Image (cartoon, coloured by chain):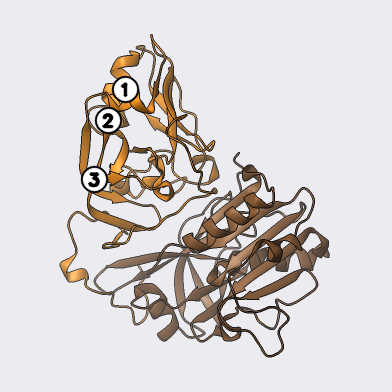
Amino acid sequence: MGTSGPGPGPWQTARVEEVIEETRTAKSFRLRLATATPYLAGQYFVVRLTAPDGYTASRSYSVASAPEEPASSIEITVERLQDGEVSSYLHDVVVAGDRLELRGPIGGWFVWRGDTPALLVGGGSGVVPLMSMLRLARRLGRSELVRLVVSARRPGELYYAKELPGPETSVVYTRETPAEWPRLAGRLTEDDLRGAMLPQATAYVCGSSGFADHVTDLLDKLGFASDKIRVERFGPSA
Amino acid sequence: MSFTRGFRGRGHTERNPGLPPGQYDVGSDWPVLTAEATPQLATSSWTFAVEGLVRRPVTWSWEEIHALPAASYAGAIHCVTTWSKFGVHFSGVSVDTLLAAAEPLESATYVVAWSHTGYTTNLPLADVTGDKAWVVWEYEGRPLEAGHGGPARLLVPHLYFWKSAKWVAGLRLLDHDEPGFWEVNGYHDRGDPWLEQRYQGD
């Protein structure tokens, strides 16, 4: 069941080229890599912060940008967590021109290579690795291979709000919708996924553990084989 | 070593000596990280097997494995995603007990643990013998939840937690190393948290 992808190289220093505000609590960081590093859509990098006394803190962040050749820069999206030691540093301190230590890519399972049908289902910040896949599909001109269903609490909390909408994507709001939205606010249902079914698709589900369980239950009811479901759960990663 | 501009870190002056390098104490949370859908396994049809290089391959039912001498673990667990959790209690049966019943051959040096979901992970035999590994079905005195690997999971707490296969179905003894699911996907072959063996090449 394994599909090995590129593995992590040594730690390298990247330069922050741009900081993009995605939502009130999410920022993307475009990082120029010292060493061009191939990666696959869905993989993540580890960011390591080092204090003057040598103390370090590391956290993993999914890549949101589509793989490029050569991959000389990547974009990660970071949700600012309450009391998040690393995420709050990245949000409150880091500006363009800063240098960050990172290592990757990591993860050879939750990856999409751009050539097979894929159902992408993301909740909240779980959309990040799926955005890499969507961007790759669009760049390859293979949008017909992917369907992306994103669950967000309210309009202001949708990541990539300008770029994400398209014929191959749909957004489900759970608490509050934009004005005149065709669907009532509420949890993701079987109906929301039914319209996104593609023959022979592999499902990529990413979000909190509760979200992931809910979606895999729905997929099961829709007859999706469990060995065609790949899950990435976001635990608290402060 | 290069420092990160403006980063001082938090609370590390009182760093717990039980915390391996690069880990933080997650406190009372227990994050769930799984690559698959959570299976709902009925204990009525659940089995656990020891096979491969053994004199007597054995398969236990849920009732049979519960009839073996009980064993428990109290201590810490360490996840490769950098959280550690202290003061946890698991109970079940020692892997030593299971292996003793199956009588490993002299040639056995590695094991592959496999799960009812198809997940696999590899371990040197020496890492699951000598009171270092358990098959557990209770957490803090209550049945282990499905999300955390219930009805039963492997527990190898001195290695990163991906080695503690959820929904474990058995151990296969081998005379060679056979990388498992995460190990072929970029993670370290052994996974010792004190040596920070997180990824291939560490």
Secondary structure under badge 2? strand
Q: Are marks 2 and 1 on the same chain?
A: yes
Q: Quadrant of the N terminus of chain B?
A: bottom left
Instruction: Name which residue type carries label 2.
Output: Val
Q: Is residue B125 above or below residue A191?
A: above
Q: Nearer the viewer, residue A159 or A45?
A: A159
Question: Is A51 on the left-hand or right-hand side of B151?
Answer: left
Name the residue rendered at 26%, 74% in the picture.
B10
Question: Is B85 on the left-hand or right-hand side of A135?
Answer: left
N-terminal-most mark, 3 or 2: 2
Chain A shade: brown
Q: Chain of mark 1?
A: B
Q: Chain of mark 3?
A: B
Classify 10 Å Cα crowding around label 2: few (below 14), some (14-19), many (20 and above). many
Image x and y of residue B191, in percent: 37, 43
Q: Chain of mark 2?
A: B
Image x and y of residue A87, in percent: 41, 75
Question: Is A236 on the left-hand or right-hand side of B181?
Answer: left
Instruction: Name which residue type carries label 1.
Output: Leu
Q: Which residue is mark 1?
A: B98
Q: Is residue A15 above or below residue A43?
A: below
Secondary structure under badge 1? helix
Which is more foreground, mark 3 or mark 2? Answer: 3
N-terminal-most mark, 2 or 1: 2
Q: Which residue is mark 3?
A: B141
Instruction: Name which residue type carries label 3.
Output: Gly
The letter of the orange chain is B
Which is more foreground, mark 1 or mark 3? Answer: 3
N-terminal-most mark, 1 or 3: 1
